[in-house]
Image (spheres, rainbow, N blue to C red):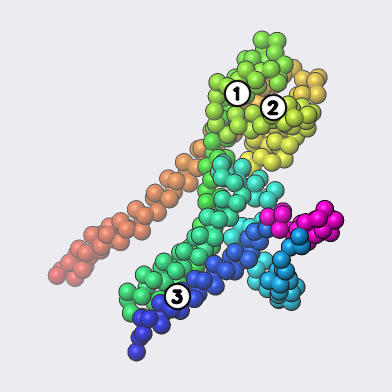
């Protein structure tokens, strides 16, 4: 006998457990004042301030953390990796490669919402069927969807941004060659080009100029772009700029040659992609039309062979 109230309570408890585990995996930092208050008590007392209230809850929380922390480190670490809760530096680099303008905290908060909301939402939807098995199935499906949404968003954004980078690189190289040919240095040519363009390559080069203004060397700024680039073609182009910034390279012809190579590579890539898509389009025709054709061909064979 199915009890909808019990199923709803089970779905709510499971959703609360997922939310609690995800929140523990995110490890939100306490405010600096709360973390340093214990070390400032002596200075406050010497200045005549009243002692602060007791911190029994904090002490109890610290005891629980030290006692139960090692036991929950493994599952919480796995959950953190599933949600994409890497370090701030790695996550910031992944967000930049994906072209997502949100902060690390906003991305983690979105992952938490989906990891907790999707199982509860689908589990509640499964209650309408009146079957405990379907409720469990919907809950597990929601958990998988919620955990995978954040990483899949990053992967899709990275692929789209890499496609835009490969499309924009030849145009940017040609535009730089024209400006360098007018007796301009590479930083001056970039400063003249960037306000007139947009796109991921322009954003990367603008970041290089910003790094130079902050004190980076020209070669170091381009090398950093090459290291952080998510596309191999962009990485090679930025390393070429790093080598060209050291001098000894006729930059304008070299940029035009780079543009021709990048355009040829992009054309070959598009042709290969078109060939793969043609094969993908042929397969449904073969799967659905071939049986029909065989049926039309084989249908008259009994009459031709046996006369009936």
- What's the residue at 72%, 31% (across, down)? 211
Q: Mark 3 sits on what residue?
A: 11
Where on the picture, by quarter, is residue 45? bottom right
Mark 2 neighbour density, 10 Å: few (under 14) some (14–19) many (20 or more):
many
Quadrant containing the N terminus is bottom left
Mark 1 neighbour density, 10 Å: few (under 14) some (14–19) many (20 or more):
some
Labelled pair 2, 3 in contact (Cβ < 8 Å): no
Q: CA distance from mark 2 to mark 3?
A: 52 Å
Labelled pair 1, 2 in contact (Cβ < 8 Å): yes
Q: Earlier in the sequence, mark 1 or mark 2?
A: 1
Q: Earlier in the sequence, mark 2 or mark 3?
A: 3
Q: Mark 2 sits on what residue?
A: 209
Mark 3 neighbour density, 10 Å: few (under 14) some (14–19) many (20 or more):
many
Q: Mark 1 sits on what residue?
A: 194
Examine the rendering and report whether any part of residue 240 can be seen. Answer: no
Measured from the top left, where is residue 103 in percent x and y?
59, 46
Residue 44 lies in magenta, yes or no?
A: yes
The secondary structure that most of the magenta stretch takes on is helix
Secondary structure beneath disc 3?
Answer: helix
Secondary structure beneath disc 1?
Answer: helix
């Amino acid at each position: 006998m199915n009890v909808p109230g019990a199923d709803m309570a089970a779905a709510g408890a499971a959703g609360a457990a997922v939310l609690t585990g995800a929140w523990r995996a995110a490890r939100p930092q306490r405010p600096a004042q709360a973390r340093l208050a214990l070390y400032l008590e002596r200075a406050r007392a010497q200045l005549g301030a009243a002692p602060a209230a007791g911190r029994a809850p904090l002490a109890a929380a610290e005891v629980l953390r030290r006692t139960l922390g090692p036991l929950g480190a493994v599952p919480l670490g796995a959950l953190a990796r599933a949600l994409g809760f890497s370090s701030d530096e790695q996550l910031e680099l992944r967000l930049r490669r994906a072209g997502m303008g949100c902060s690390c905290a906003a991305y983690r908060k979105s992952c938490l919402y989906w990891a907790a909301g999707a199982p509860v939402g689908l589990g509640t939807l499964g209650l309408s069927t009146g079957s405990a098995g379907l409720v469990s199935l919907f809950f597990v499906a929601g958990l998988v969807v919620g955990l995978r949404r954040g990483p899949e968003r990053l992967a899709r954004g990275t692929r789209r941004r890499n496609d835009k980078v490969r499309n924009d690189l030849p145009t940017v190289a040609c535009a730089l060659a024209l400006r360098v040919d007018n007796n301009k240095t590479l930083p001056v040519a970039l400063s003249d080009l960037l306000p007139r363009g947009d796109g991921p390559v322009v954003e990367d080069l603008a970041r290089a100029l910003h790094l130079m203004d902050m004190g980076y060397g020209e070669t170091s700024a381009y090398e950093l772009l090459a290291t952080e680039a998510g596309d191999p073609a962009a990485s090679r182009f930025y390393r070429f700029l790093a080598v060209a910034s050291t001098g000894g390279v006729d930059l304008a012809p070299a940029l035009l040659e780079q543009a021709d190579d990048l355009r040829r590579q992009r054309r070959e890539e598009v042709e290969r992609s078109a060939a793969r898509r043609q094969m993908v389009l042929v397969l449904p025709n073969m799967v659905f039309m071939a049986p029909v054709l065989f049926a039309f061909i084989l249908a008259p064979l009994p009459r031709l062979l046996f006369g009936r």
